[in-house]
Each structure stands twice: as structure tokens, then as C-alpha cells.
Amino acid sequence: MQDRDAMIGFLAQCIETGADGLPRFGDQAQGTCHNHSLGADEPMVWRKFDWPAQGDPLAFPTGYLANDAVVLSSGPAPLIAHIADFGDTERQFRRFDAGKGDGGQVVQIIDGAAYAIMTEDGGAGYQWFVGPGCRGAAGGLERFKSWLFFAADVTPGSWRQRIAELTMVRSASGCAPGFSQSLTRYRLEPIPVPLFALFEGKRQSLTALVPTIVSEHFARDTVRASDHLERFFLGNGLGMYRWERWEQRGRSFNSEIDRQSAQFAQSGRCPPLPFSTPPAPGWVMIDCRMWTNLIRQDDPWRASAFGWPGRLEGQLP
């Protein structure tokens, strides 16, 4: 996958409306979005919400969390935002509720690989991911080669893997004396993805075969040594549509994994998918979000109106 626009297609969404009123994305899209990926200033006709828990009428039909993926800037090192927008009794969709969980992550394509460079959740504010490149005199974008999602060598049929070195700092110019090592592996596969489409007061269940990059981020440099795993599903035309958290018994620092795993399994918030399996015996999934609850916006919205992450140009090297 040598083409930068093709890589962006797995990180940012472009969801259109077909003649039948249903959402259309990926290879089925006609290109109403610039370069087939939605920019932050373009009208968003469909938004991606998570699946609500079974039997929770307060979360129907929107779920709890919208996660939209938009291009912030193009060029040699494009920036893509995955925007986390909660809606409940205290927080409102389409409004950035600072310090209450809203935020997301920013991904940058650097030298043919996609890296998470910054995140904000809860009340911690901006937190930047940097690697050993921050020690260089020139620094530049080398500093952000840290939390890896995938690289241009992604291929069907087998895992590609690297050991990522990273740490978290409070500013884009920060560095650290040491870095943790994370086994990162990724592959490209067609996955049959269940979706809901809500439009004109109707809710329809669909299944789409979505070219998907599955990306796994382990806490240590091997599966065996890791106490936890985060797994991401990045779909062509959808961006990130699923996130999973797994813990390894005997390694995990979480004493509640069995209770949390059972509680999550009962919720029905994440249906079974190919590659949503334990990486080895002794691993259990304790949490997951599935953003394929697609809701058409009668009043189209622009991600730039959310106001997150704001202007990053002055903070980046």
C-alpha cells in the first residue's frame, strides 16, 4: 500500500448516501468527499455511533459515543483526527465537553507508516506519543515514530510486525530518558461487518464486506510478556470502526477482569468478528466499542465545529 491516499482511506471516513437512502462507503462511494476521505470542514451526512447495550432504552438509537474520522491536513505528512464525542445526561453530541471524556486521537502518516501522535481523554488534556527520535538534535517528525498502527507493507494473509518504542509526554516538543517496547502487528483482510443504518425514522440492519486493517498493540515486546492488548479495526471508507481491550490472566494488574469480561459479554455491544479472538490462551476481552451504528444527519454537521483538537500547526515541529 504505497499510495498515501490509500492509507488515509483506512484512517478517515467518507460515507455517502446511495439511491436507496442507505450509507455507501469504500469501493462503493462515488467520491463526493475530497480524495475519497472526509475533511474536517466538509459536511458530514452520516456519523458513526457505537452499538448500545442490549436492553438499554436510554442509549437507543445513538449509543453512547460517536467516533468520526476526518482529515485535518493533507500534504507529505497528513494529519487525521479520530474524534470521540460522548452523549448522555451530562454531555451532548456535537459539543466538545472538555474534561468529561470528549477528545480523541490524532494520527499522522510519516514515511509510509501511520502513527498515533497525540490523544486526549478525560481531564488530562493533550498527551503526546513520542519515540527515541525525540532525542535527535533536529527532531522533526522523527520524534512521533512511536505508537504504530500500520505501515505501507501491510498485506493480506499474514501478520506484519514491528517493535514500537514509545512514551507519553505533555508537550509535542517533549522527550524522555526511556521508552517502553510494544509488539505491534497488523494485517489487511476483508471482514463481513454488521452495521445499522438509521435514516428517515427507519433502522435497517446490514452486512458489508469491508477491507480492514487489523492492528494490535501489545503492552510489551512479546505476547507472552504483555499484560494487556489494544486491538483496532480500520475499515476502508470508515476509518476506525472497532476498538478492543484484552487482558492476560496471570500478567494483568487488573483484579476485576473476570467480572468485567462477563459484564461486557452480556452487554452485546460488540458482535463476534473475524480476528476478534484471544492472541493466546489465557486472554479475555474486557471492553470494546463498535462504531458501525450509522445515523444519517438531517442537519449535516462539520467536525471542525466540534473544536477538537484545535489548531496544531504551532505545536508541531
Image (cartoon, rainbow, N blue to C red):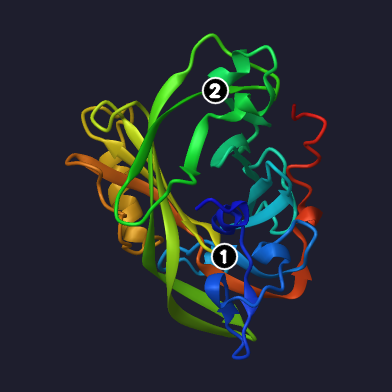
Which residue is denoted by mark 1 in the rendering?
Answer: 237
Query: Which label's residue is closer to the chain start, 1 or 2?
Result: 2
> Residue 235, percent across and down?
49, 61
**Is residue 94 rendered to the left or right of residue 85?**
right
Which residue appears at 22% of the width and 34% of the height?
249
Which residue is more in the foreground, 60 or 20?
20
Placement of the C terminus among the 4 image quadrants: top right
Q: Quick one: SS at disc 1?
A: loop
Which residue appears at 61% of the width and 13% of the height?
135
Which residue is more in the foreground, 75 or 227?
75
Which residue is denoted by mark 2 in the rendering?
Answer: 131
**Is residue 14 rendered to the left or right of residue 132?**
right
Within 10 Å of the Cα at label 2, are there few (<14), some (14-19), or many (20+) other Cα atoms? many
Within 10 Å of the Cα at label 1, are there few (<14), some (14-19), or many (20+) other Cα atoms? many
Q: Is residue 257 above or below residue 38?
A: above
> Is residue 14 in sight in this rendering?
yes
Q: Residue furthest front?
A: 2
Identify the mark at residue 220; answer none if there is no mark: none
